[in-house]
Amino acid sequence: MAAAVASKPTATLYEGARLIIGDGSEAIDDGAILVRDGLIEYVGPATEATIESDVRRVSLVGKTVMPTIVNPHGHIGYLKNGNTDSANFSRENVLDHLRRLSYYGISVFQSLGTDRDDVEIAIRNQQRDGTLADPELALLLSAASGLAAPTPGSENGGAFFAPDAIREASTPDEARAVVREIAKKNPDVIKFWVDTRDGVKEKFSPEVYSAIVDEAHNLGLRAIAHIYELDDAKGVVRAGADGTAHMVRNPGPDKELLDMLVANDVFVFTSMSIQRGIPEGPAWLDDPSLLETVKPEHTATVRAMMAQVPESMRPQLKAGYEVLESGLRTYVDAGVRVLLSADSGVLHQFIGFAEHRELESMVDAGMPVLAAIKASTLLPAQMLGLDDRGSLEAGKRADLLVLDANPLEAIANTRKIHTVIIGGIELDRPAMSARFLSTT
Ligand SMILES: [Zn+2]
């Protein structure tokens, strides 16, 4: 009886690929990955692999395998047909986005504070209890609703596409009460905004956001702050925030902030590509890998939106982006825990594609490729407490991004995807692409 079972392949050996482990270590040139029951059983040099006779063998000669990407910052459910709008938000659109993420090899996505009617939380719960098990859906984490200060006579300064989905608080006591209400939904993190949106919105005082952070911590939750300004970054770190959703804008980080970030091991999200799309010019919208999921008429919608930014503003946007690039180098050199954050699902940040643009932006700014990949895979997985994900390691899930070209030579090669394997299951990407392009 045992022999009959053994005659059927029980495991798959992927052999011959270059392996990027995701922990920052040097790539392995002729690698092997043995996958059994959705888990990696062996990963390393092919010459050291023990190969049983009943194993299914798949040659990946000429390919590169890296871990799938983990994005801890985006806003799911709002972008559709090139428009970012609360009217687009639905369970169906959230699920569509989770499929787009999987398609591009983004296996985990954390949505930061723009849930409506608990749609995100419900999907997250179904994934967690196993009633929505589907390798075509990226794993969703959610902050549920975030918090922002009220602006009298106007919408708050939280996410522009979802001010009504964001909770407001005016005093420390109110802030604590709102955090407790949000915590009842068992969110993965507490998100809050501290931003005047160029002087037109109210922002939380340090007293109020200190209460948010403290109450979150009392409840065993971490708190992430949206900030753009240097003083606000220092303020939220002083208040105990666990991370910032953006790097600081002009003038960039100073020594005091860097010292505080390192001393408290506060993580910093990169959020670069969302600031790059317009000053770079629209040619990137023609990327063939983007057109695998987005129709030309919908990239045209985004192109028209980008073209509305006056020519006279472009030098300023470009200079602002250069501050982010030099800032990234400064954080990295100082030893700050920098994590990929694509802020995807907003404006031109096409879900699934934006994550690859973000990784490219990090490398273009001067981050070493292997460090940038680690900051896009293992480090965010660890931050999210997903110990079985984020790197190619025996015992972890077989979540593999298989590439036709080598990202160590050109980082944009992470978009030349041969296949995506999630929990040991190979996605039918051509069928998925056809469905993305056939729906309106
Ligand atoms: Zn965001």
Image (cartoon, rainbow, N blue to C red):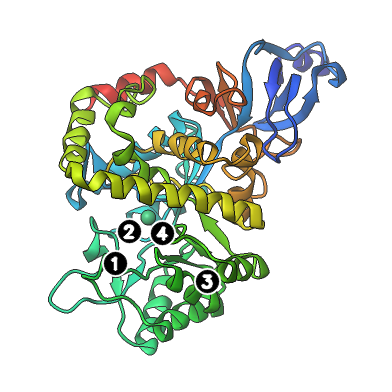
Q: Quadrant of residue 173?
A: bottom left
- Whether 274 is drawn above or below 384: the answer is above
Q: Are marks 1 and 4 in contact (CB under 8 Å)?
A: no
Q: Nearer the N terminus, badge 2 or badge 3?
A: 2
Is the residue under label 2 in contact with that under label 1 (CB below 8 Å)?
A: yes
Sequence order check, earlier mark of 2 and 4: 2
The label shown at residue 249 is 4
Sequence-first disc among 1 and 2: 2
Which-is-in-front pick, marks 3 and 1? 3
Neighbourhood count class around disc 4 (C-alpha, 10 Å): few under 14, some 14–19, many 20 upward: some
Q: CA distance from mark 2 to mark 4?
A: 23 Å
**Could you say where residue 318 lies in the image, as x and y percent from the top left?**
34, 45
1 displayed left or right of 176: right
Q: Tell me the residue that label 2 is attached to.
A: 114
Could you tell me residue 284's position as x and y percent?
34, 28
Query: Which residue in the protein does label 3 denote?
Result: 241
> Which of the numbered marks, if any, corresponds to residue 153?
none
Q: Nearer the viewer, mark 2 or mark 4?
A: 4
Ligand 1 under 8 Å from disc 4 Cβ: no
Q: Amino acid at mark 1?
A: Ile
User: Which quadrant of the rendered structure holds the C terminus?
Assistant: top left
